[in-house]
Image (cartoon, helix red, strand yellow):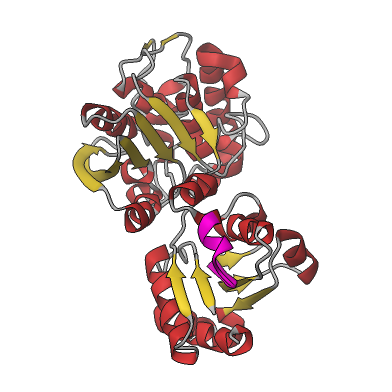
Amino acid sequence: MRILVAPDKFAGTLSAPEAAAAIADGWGRQAPGDQLDMVPMADGGPGFVDVLHTSLGGRIVGIDVRGPFGDRVPASFLFVARTAYIESAHACGRHLTGSQRAEHASTYGVGELVLAAQRAGANRVVVGLGGSGSNDGGAGLLAALGATADRPLDAGVAGLEGVTHVDLPPSPDVELVIAADVDNPLAGPTGATKVFGPQKGIPQAQVVRWDAALAAYGAVTGRMVASSAGAGAAGGLGHALLLLGAARRSGVDVAAEAVRLSERTAHADLVVTGEGSFDRSSAGGKVPAGVAARAAEAGRPCVVLAGRVDLPSSDLRTLGVDAAYSLVETLGVERALTEPAAALADLASRVARAWSR
């Protein structure tokens, strides 16, 4: 059989390439005659650049940028055929902010990455949004590109309180693309602060205050843009990029197009995907849903291997998934967390026993 192995990362335990390698290892032990096509995937969040580099090759360009609190941090972008792929989490990710001071976290470093890509000769810049620890509406990015205001744009959402005027920079002389799976607006009940702020460390008691600051900032920069789907992605970084003329696309679609996922699915007999937690959020633009959709288009069966599975069988059918298997249920929580690669390989071996002909 020809098996397409296309998982996302297993957050906190395995990167997407590591997950793909573990699945291939286990599958090969049970069905050594099967041909495995490994296509690690991402949705624009952490791992986006590494996943694309694995499939596309190209050149990784390293650069130090301003981190969320002003210190310099290492970051990089992938350069392939005059397209630069940027992972915004490199400059403002939750791994850099922890759970503290999110109201002061800036996206200035993401703007520096865009500028560096432009200087490197890119005529198209794809910015993966996800895993951010910031909530500044992309004000920091705009500041890095030359925006000015009557309040500091590089001090997080806290710096925006009381803003009444923002002079936007000229749009970069490149095609900008947002890769994201979030369709929230900038502010309001479903905006960046109220939906994602608490999980980034913004105290619940301050959510209304910082949501109001983002609403005021959105009003003076572009009320229609602020209400657009995706403006609230990555703490509002989507808003800033939309102001600069960026096109918004699903992160999974961007990755799938780059790695020719549809074409490779059509040549497979079975598609295997996975992620850390396969639950109701997975339907909203996550990797397994995107992979399963392409398997359904090609008329190929699709199975999911996940750390946890929390979806009824009716939802699996709706997504185009034929079966889903849980590491935790099959091998236990402790092994899934302490030996994730070995556990995933063992699960893949069991699944191969059921699915390989």
Q: Nearer the viewer, residue 140 or 164?
A: 140
Measuring 51% from the left and 60% from the top, which residue is drawn there?
Answer: 264
Measuring 33% from the left and 58% from the top, which residue is drawn there?
Answer: 54
Is residue 264 in the magenta section?
Answer: yes
Q: Nearer the viewer, residue 20 or 165?
A: 20
Q: Which x, y percent locates residue 135?
A: 46, 35
Measuring 62% from the left and 56% from the top, which residue is drawn there?
Answer: 294
Q: Which x, y percent locates residue 316?
A: 73, 66
Against 257, residue 239 (above or below) is above
Q: Nearer the viewer, residue 229 or 223?
A: 229
Residue 295 lies in quadrant: bottom right
Q: Residue furthest front?
A: 267
In the image: residue 146, left or right of residue 133: left
In the image: residue 339, left or right of residue 297: left
Q: Which x, y percent locates residue 242?
A: 50, 24
Q: Which x, y percent locates residue 174?
A: 36, 24
* Observer able to see residue 340: no
Identify the image quadrant of the N terminus.
bottom right
Identify the image quadrant of the C terminus.
bottom right
Give the extent of the magenta segment.
Answer: 263-275
Against 76, residue 142 (above or below) is above
Is residue 59 in the magenta section?
Answer: no
- How many marks do you count on the picture? 0
Measuring 59% from the left and 73% from the top, which residue is drawn there?
Answer: 269
* Observer able to see residue 25: yes
Against 51, residue 254 (above or below) is above
Q: Nearer the viewer, residue 204 or 81?
A: 81
In the image: residue 124, left or right of residue 226: left
In the image: residue 210, left or right of residue 79: right
